[in-house]
Image (spheres, coloured by chain):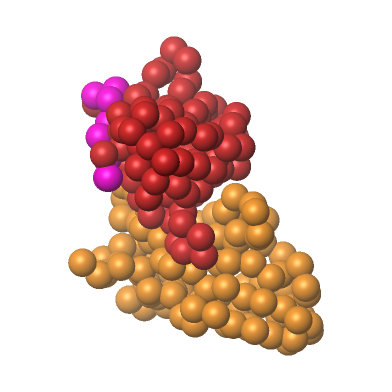
Chain colours: A red, B orange
Amino acid sequence: AQSVAQPEDQVNVAEGNPLTVKCTYSVSGNPYLFWYVQYPNRGLQFLLKYITGDNLVKGSYGFEAEFNKSQTSFHLKKPSALVSDSALYFCAVRDDAGTASKLTFGTGTRLQVTL
Amino acid sequence: AAGVIQSPRHLIKEKRETATLKCYPIPRHDTVYWYQQGPGQDPQFLISFYEKMQSDKGSIPDRFSAQQFSAYHSELNMSSLELGDSALYFCASSLGLGGYTFGSGTRLTVV
């Protein structure tokens, strides 16, 4: 069974500082990894994905993530945080068990960026 | 670009009533997924459809059913509603092995 773990319930960072939101995964086959962001009372917005290729994936709003196979990790990063980045971030994984395979989400990490 | 459309945005029902949630996927996306997100919870997979056939089933109660119609739109039918069914219900669509696109969700409140 596929799963992702987000070990931090909340991450606090000052505006302008780099941020990292951690995610580790477990799959039986090739991992397809995703990051989504959710603002209060809103839907899930796609940030970036790793399917294959370069381990460093660049996404929306200046976010990037690094796929590390040996550590089974896919941490989300941003060089300089903004207050507007404050939201709930979900890591998700789907395995390659067919075109209709579901996404499994982590428990989410709340990012709080302060001035 | 067209997104995933869900209706209604908000729904208030009483216990034991029924509710129908609708989802219109991105054009040409052939797979639809339904997720339930309770307060402070991560989204939980309910059910998915590929080419109008159920492809996977998650933690969906027997009181719930869903189907996918032509043009791939989908409905989630919920009967004998309970207070615990109050949640945000997301629909997502995808094509192939790409990422999902989620709708804005339907907030169901059972009173």
Q: Is residue B43 positioned above or below B1 on the image?
A: above
Q: For the view shown, which residue lies furthest in the front direction?
A: A115
Asked whether residue A96 is in view, the answer is no
The answer to whether B60 appears left or right of A97 in the picture is right
The answer to whether B24 appears left or right of B108 in the picture is left
**Which residue corresponds to the image point at 60% horizontal and 61% vertical from the top-left?**
B36
The answer to whether B7 appears left or right of A51 in the picture is right
Q: Of residues B28 and A37, which is closer to you in this image? A: A37
The answer to whether B110 appears left or right of A85 in the picture is right
**Which residue corresponds to the image point at 52% horizontal and 35% vertical from the top-left?**
A12
Q: Is residue A37 positioned above or below B77 on the image?
A: above
Give the percent coordinates (x, y) of residue B102: 41, 60
**Which residue corresponds to the image point at 64% horizontal and 67% vertical from the top-left?**
B87
Q: Of residues B7 and B67, which is closer to you in this image? A: B7
Where does the C terminus of chain B fall, quadrant-wise?
bottom right
Q: Which residue range is magenta in the image?
A: A54-61
Q: Quadrant of residue B61?
A: bottom right
Q: Does the magenta portion include A108?
A: no
Asked whether residue A110 is in view, the answer is yes
Give the percent coordinates (x, y) of residue B93: 38, 61
